[in-house]
Amino acid sequence: MTEEDAPIRPAGRWVSVRLQHRHVSFDDGVEAEEPLPDGDCADEGSLSYSGIVITGYDEGEKVSEQWIPLGVDPSEADDERLIEQLREALLWQARRPPQAAGE
């Protein structure tokens, strides 16, 4: 890709939201500290699953990245977590502090 073909990136703060598929392999005898998200098992030692990546940029530099796994059958709590993360990212982009409900 040449500089002419590169996508135009806005100046200032902006947020990128995209779907990403990850594949994780586990060593024998290693147990996860948290429950693993639902996903497709390639074999007994690996797991593949999708998630949403929220990346924050400031003046063209990546300053934050958060990956939120998407389960096969997401719960209402999963949906609420995603909505909250998107809200926080967009408020950061707008340089506005979060407001309490009703303010």
Image (spheres, grey):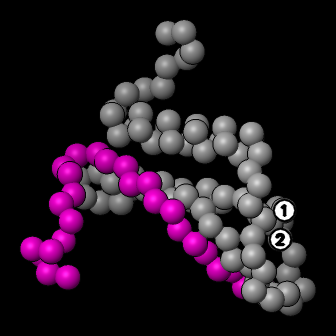
Q: Is residue 49 above or below residue 63?
A: below
**Magenta includes 17?**
yes
Tell me the crowding category of disc 1: few under 14, some 14 to 19, or many 20 or more residues within 10 angstroms, Cα based: few
Q: Nearer the viewer, residue 19 or 99?
A: 19
Residue 34 seen: yes
In the displayed structure image, the side of residue 48 where residue 92 appears, left or right:
left
Q: Residue at x 15, y 74 (%)?
A: 5
Report which residue position mark 1 lands on: 35
Give the image quarter of residue 21.
bottom right
On the image, the x and y values in percent for residue 35 come to 84, 62
Viewer-closest of 28 and 17? 17
Residue at point 21%, 58% (across, down): 9
In the picture as drawn, the residue positioned furthest to the top comes out as: 102
Q: Which mark is residue 32?
A: 2
Q: Which residue type carries mark 2? A: Ala
Picture coordinates of residue 89, whole percent (x, y): 45, 42
Eyeballing the image, is 67 above or below 44? Answer: above
Task: Determine contact: label 2, label 1, CB under 8 Å.
Answer: yes
| Coordinates of residue 95 in the picture (x, y in percent) | 34, 33
Residue placed farthest to the front in the image? 73
Amino acid type at circle 1 is: Pro
Instruction: Judge whether 72 appears above or below 84 on screen.
Output: below
Q: Is residue 94 left or right of residue 9?
A: right
Residue 26 in the image: x percent, y percent? 77, 84
- In what element is the residue under mark 1? loop
Q: Which residues are magenta?
A: 1-26
